[in-house]
Structures are given as structure tokens and as C-alpha cells.
Image (cartoon, grey):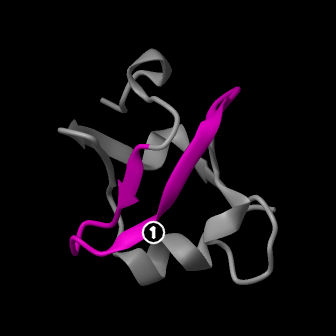
Amino acid sequence: MPVQANNIREHMKVMGSDRQQVGTVDHVEGNRLKRAKSDSPDGKHHYIELSSCERIDGENVVVNQTCEQAKKAWHC
């Protein structure tokens, strides 16, 4: 079961299943998590589907993909 949007807060770290940081939460927008554009090499916001968010671990949102897989699946 995916993480509930109301449990995700601004500035939480987004972590891959390999424990590498994917980015930082800007906010939740619909059924997607919007990453902070300051984390992106292209200076743009990128989105991760909430269905990819596996769990919340302290102050981290953990996705069900490695960091590299999550970056390849970004939506602009």
C-alpha cells in the first residue's frame, strides 16, 4: 500500500531503496510528489508518483526503486 499523501511533509528527504538520496520534497501535488528544484541539475521540479513511495522512515520518504531508477522515472 502506498504512502498516504498527508503523511509527507515539505523538506523530507526522498531516499531510494539503496539508501541513496533522490531529492527533497517540495510538496505533494495530486498523486505525485514534487521534488525541490534546488536538488535538480537542470534547475527544474521533477515528480515522483506517490505509488512509488513505499514507506516513511523517520524524516525520509523511501521509494521502491534505487536512486538511479527513480531518477530515470522522473516526470517534469
| Front in this rendered view, residue 63 or 41 | 41
Secondary element type, mark 1: strand
Question: Is the residue 73 above or below the residue 47 in the image?
Answer: below
Image quarter of the N terminus: top left
Q: In x, y percent, where is residue 54?
A: 30, 44
Q: In x, y percent, where is residue 7?
A: 38, 21
Q: Is residue 22 magenta?
A: yes
Residue type indicated by callout 1 = Val
Q: Is residue 71 left or right of residue 44?
A: left
Tell me the quarter of the picture where residue 65 sits. bottom left
Q: Is residue 10 left or right of residue 75?
A: left
Main SS of the magenta segment? strand
Residue at the image position 70 percent from the left and 26 percent from the top: 30
Looking at the image, how many numbered discs can be counted on the residues?
1
Query: What residue range appears in magenta?
Result: 12-32
Q: In x, y percent, where is residue 66?
A: 34, 75
Q: Is residue 71 left or right of residue 2?
A: right
Query: What residue would you read off at disc 1?
Result: 22
Question: Is the residue 37 above or below the residue 52 in the image?
Answer: below
Residue at the image position 46 percent from the left and 78 percent from the top: 69
